[in-house]
Amino acid sequence: LRRSCEHVTEGSDEAGSGTLLNRIYTELYITEGQSEEVNTQHEVRQLETTSKMETVHDTPIKCHNIFNALPEQQRPIRVVLTKGVAGVGKTVSVQKFSLDWAEGLENQDISLLILLSFRELNLIRDEQHSLLKLLQVFHPTLQEVTAEQLAVCKVLFIFDGLDESRLSLDFTNRQVVSDVTQESSVNVLLTNLIQGNLLPLALIWITSRPAAAGQIPPTCVDRVTEVRGFTDAQKEEYFRRRFNDEEQSSRIISHIRTSRSLHIMSQVPVFCWIIATVLEHMLTADQIGELPKTLTDLYSHFLLVQTKRKKFKYDEGHETSPQELMEADREVLLKLGRLAFEHLEKGNIMFYQEDLEQCGLDVTEASVYSGVCTEIFKRESVIFQKTVYCFVHLSIQEFLAAVYMFHCYTNRNTEISKIFGNKDSRHPSLDVFLRRAMEKSLESNNGRLDLFVRFLHGLSLESNQRILGGLLGQTKNSPEITQRAITNLKTMTRDDISPDRSINIFHCLMEMNDHSIQQEIQEFLRSENRSEKELSEIHCSALAYMLQMSEEVLDELDPKKYNTSLEGQRRLIPAVRNCRKAQLTDCGLSETHCEIVASALKSSPSLLRELDLRRNSPSDSGIKRLSAGLESPNCRLEILSVSFSLVNTLCVIYSSRECTYGCNMSAISRSSVIAALKSNPSHLRELELRGNWDLQDSGVKELCGFLGSPDCRLETLRSGCCFLSAISCASLVSALKSNPYHLRELELSRNNLQDSGVKELCGCLKNPDRRLETLRSGH
C-alpha cells in the first residue's frame, strides 16, 4: 500500500513514475457538510458557486481526521461520503490518508486499510464472490487473512470514484449478506457492507463527484464532506512548490488573478497542473504575445505543448511548426476526439480497450500519446488484463470533443447533421452550425454540454485555429460570419431555457473575445438612472452572473425594477443566490425557476432572508422543489410570502373540470410547503398567506402543526381571504396553547370565522401567558 501511494502522477506522468506525494502535497480544503444545491449545473458552474462561499461558515477537516467525530456529535462516524468535482483532489486525499497510515503516522487504531476503486470493481461486476474472496482477488497479500480475523479487527474500506461505477447499487434489495464467506454479486456485497449488515464495525469511506453521490441513501451516511480544492493561499503554495523560480511562480499567480475563468478553475489541482504546464512552456520558450486568458486559448496551447513533448520524447526532438506538429498527430488526436465526444454524449469518463477500438484507436498508439490519454492502472493478476483509460481531466475530454466536432464541420462530415438535427441537406454556415450546437446544449437539463459548446465557440476564432495548426482542417473565416455568430448569441431567446443555462451564452461570447455585453453591464451598474436603460435578455443573463459572483451581497432583487421583457426578468432570477431579499411577485415561476430559488435556500451559507413569491402559479413539482429548499438546514429565511392560487381563483370563477383538478394539485403543494416549514421551523419570523383560497380549514390544521412546534419562532401570520371558518380558529387556539411565546400578530380578515371563532381567538389576547398583541378579523 505504501509503495502504491507514495508517488503521485500529475497529468501525463507515466504510471509508476511521478513525484513523491509528500514532496508536493498541498492540504486541500475539506469541509464538514456540503452545499445542498441540486447538482443540475455543469461542474464549472458549481466551482463558480463554491468560489464565493464564505469559508468562515464551514467546518474544515484535515484529511486524517475524516473519521473523528466533532465535540457536538454524539454517535461515532462509520460511513463517510466525500464529494467533489472532477480533478479537485478526492483521490489524492485518499492516497495521502493511506500513505500516512501505511507509514505509521496517522490512524494507527485501524488494523487493516483496504483501498478499492470502482474502476477496478467494474471489471468483476458480473461475477459472484464472497467479501473475503473479493479482498484476496484485489489484494493477494491478504490470502492468509481469515474470516474470524476480519470480523474482530478494525477495518477501513475506501471505495474511490463512485461516479465511475458501472455497478447497480440497489439499496432496496432485501437480500441480506452478513457472512464474509457468503458468495453474492459485487452490488449486493457493497450495499450490505455500507448498510452495516456485513462487518458492522468496519469503517467505510466513499468518494464521488456530486452528481453520482445520490446513489448512497442519506440514512446510510454518518458524515458528508466536500473537497473544495485549493483556496487562494493554497493555489499560491502549489505554484511556488511547482516552480523553484520565484519570479516565474509570481508571474503565473499574477496572471491567473487577471482572468476570472482561470482563477475559478484553478481551485482544481489538475487544472493548476494544466495552467502550470502551458505557462511554464510559454515563459521559458521566450514566446512573445499575450498569455492565454480564455479557456479555449489555454487548452489549445495545452494540446500544442503536449504534442511537442511527445514529439521530443519519441521523435528525437526535431523542431517543427505547430502546423507540422498537429498534422503529424492529426489521426490519433481526432480518434481521441471522437472517443471524447461519443462518451461525453453518454456521460462516460472512463474507457476500456473495446471503447478505444470502436473509435479506431490502437491501444499502443493511445499509450504513446500519454500526454492526453493516460493509462490509469495495470495489474499482473489475470482479472486485470483489462486496462482502463481516461482523460487527464473531464475538461480535456470536453475540449477534444469540441476539436473533433469542429473538424467534422470543416470537413463536411454528415455526422453534424445527425447530431444537431439539421433538416437541410446543405452544409450550414459556421454561424448556423454554432447556433444549432448552442441550442442543443441549452436543451440539457444538467448543463453537461456547457463547456463543450464554450470551447466550440472559442475554436471559431482564427487565433485558436492557428495554434492548433492543421488539426481542424481548412476554415473559411470572415469577419461577417464571426459577427453573425456573435449576434446570434446576443439575440438567442427561448421561453423554455433555464436562466442558469442562459448564462452560458454570455460565457460563449467571452470565449469569442466579445466583451461588449460585459462592458455595457459594468457601465449600467455604474449609472444612476438604471430604470431608464433598456436591457436585452443577454444583458440580463450577464447581469445575473455578475450579481451572483459579486463580493457584495445585493440588498434586494426585484426583476420588475429593470426595464426589460418578462423573459429578461426571469433571466435575472439566478442572482437570488447572492441577495438578502427577493421580490419575485408575478414572474410566472416555472419548476426550473423554483429550483433556482431552492438552490439559494440550500446554499452554504444561504443569504436569503426575505422571499416574496405572491401571484405565481408553479406546478406541484415546482412547489416541491421550493419546499426542499425551505426544509434545508442551511435555510435561514425569516419572511416568506406565498400565494399560489391564481389557478384556483380561475377555478372558482369558471368552475371547470380542469380547474378543479388544478385545485387538487394545489392542496398537494400546500402540504409540501407546510411539511417543509415543520422540518425547519426555527428561523421564519413572518409568513404571508393572504389570498390562498385553497388553504381553507384543512390547510390551517396542517399549518398549526408548525405553529405549535416548540421550535417555531413565527411572530406574524397573515391568512386573510383564505376561505377559513370557525374550525380554523379552534386549530389556531390549540396551537397557541402549545407554543404561546412568539406569535404577536395574527391577520385573518375576509374569512368566514363567525362570532364563535372570533370570540375564541379573543381569549388569546386576554391571556397574559400569550404574546399575541394584534388580531385582525374584519371584512
Image: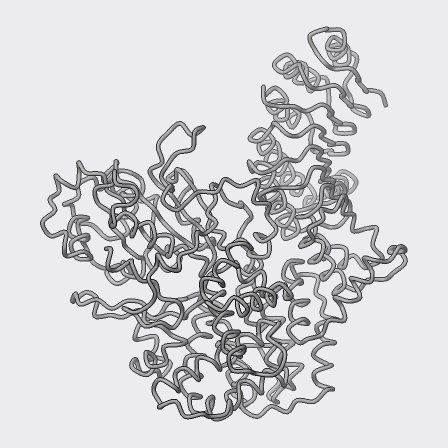
Q: Is residue 83 left or right of residue 669?
A: left
Q: Residue furthest left?
A: 144
**458 or 538, which lies in front?**
458
Residue 7: x percent and y percent? Answer: 31, 62
Q: Which residue sits at x=87%, y=60%?
A: 533
Residue 758: x percent and y percent? Answer: 77, 14
**463 or 258, which lies in front?**
258
Q: Is residue 673 above or below residue 712?
A: below
Picture colour scheme: one colour
Q: Quadrant of the C terminus?
A: top right
Q: Is residue 317 above or below residue 609?
A: below
Q: Quadrant of residue 328?
A: bottom left
Q: Quadrant of residue 693?
A: top right
Number of numbered labels in the structure image: 0
Residue 420: x percent and y percent? Answer: 57, 77
Q: Is residue 185 above or below residue 375?
A: above
Q: Is residue 425 left or right of residue 554?
A: left
Q: Is residue 662 above or below residue 20?
A: above
**73 or 260, which lies in front?**
260
Q: Which residue sits at x=71%, y=35%?
A: 640
Q: Quadrant of the N terminus?
A: bottom left
Residue 526: x percent and y percent? Answer: 83, 58
Q: Which residue sits at x=49%, y=60%?
A: 268
